[in-house]
Image: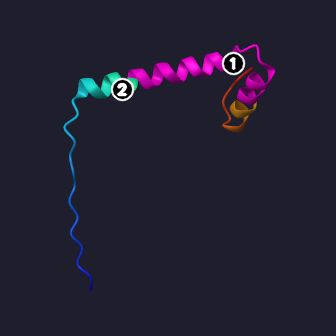
């Protein structure tokens, strides 16, 4: 039998850094979602609209 040795690595990331990262990612996602949703470009708007349908997200 083969013996395997696994080790876990713990990265010292504070809860504050995780919170800031989550807030930044959420804000960026909301910005991109609304930017594409209200864009005047038909190609960008329709592509986003079709993507929302593909991931079964409400859009109407």
Image x and y of residue 11, in percent = 22, 42
Quadrant for the N terminus in the image: bottom left
Q: Is residue 50 above or below residue 60?
A: below
Q: Identify the image quadrant of residue 23.
A: top left
Left or right: 22 as drawn, with respect to 54: left
Q: Is residue 17 left or right of residue 44?
A: left
Q: Quadrant of the C terminus?
A: top right
Task: From the image, tell me which residue sits under label 2.
Answer: 21
Q: Where are the magenta residues, as a range?
A: 23-49
| Above/below status of 1 relative to 18 | below
The x, y position of residue 13, in whole percent, is 23, 34
Q: Which mark is residue 49?
A: none
**Residue identified by numbered label 1:** 37
Furthest residue to the right? 42
Residue 36 position in % (x across, y down):
67, 20
Q: Residues within 10 Å of mark 2 (few under 14, many from 20)?
A: few
Query: Whole-Å distance between the Cαs marked 1 and 2?
Result: 24 Å
Neighbours of disc 1 within 10 Å: few (<14), some (14-19), many (20+)? some
Q: What residue lies at 22% left-to-right and 55% top-to-bottom?
A: 8
Residue depicted at x 33% and y 22%: 20
- Per the image, label 2 sits on a secondary structure element best described as helix
Q: At numbered mark 1, what does the secondary structure look like: helix, strand or loop?
A: helix
Horizontal side of residue 52 vs 7, given as left or right: right
Q: Check if residue 39 falls in the magenta segment.
A: yes
């Amino acid at each position: 039998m083969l013996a395997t040795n696994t080790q876990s690595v713990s990265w010292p990331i504070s809860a504050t850094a995780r919170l800031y990262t989550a807030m930044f990612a959420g804000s960026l996602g909301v910005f991109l979602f609304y930017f594409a949703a209200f864009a005047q470009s038909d190609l960008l708007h329709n592509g986003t609209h079709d993507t929302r349908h593909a991931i079964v997200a409400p859009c109407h």
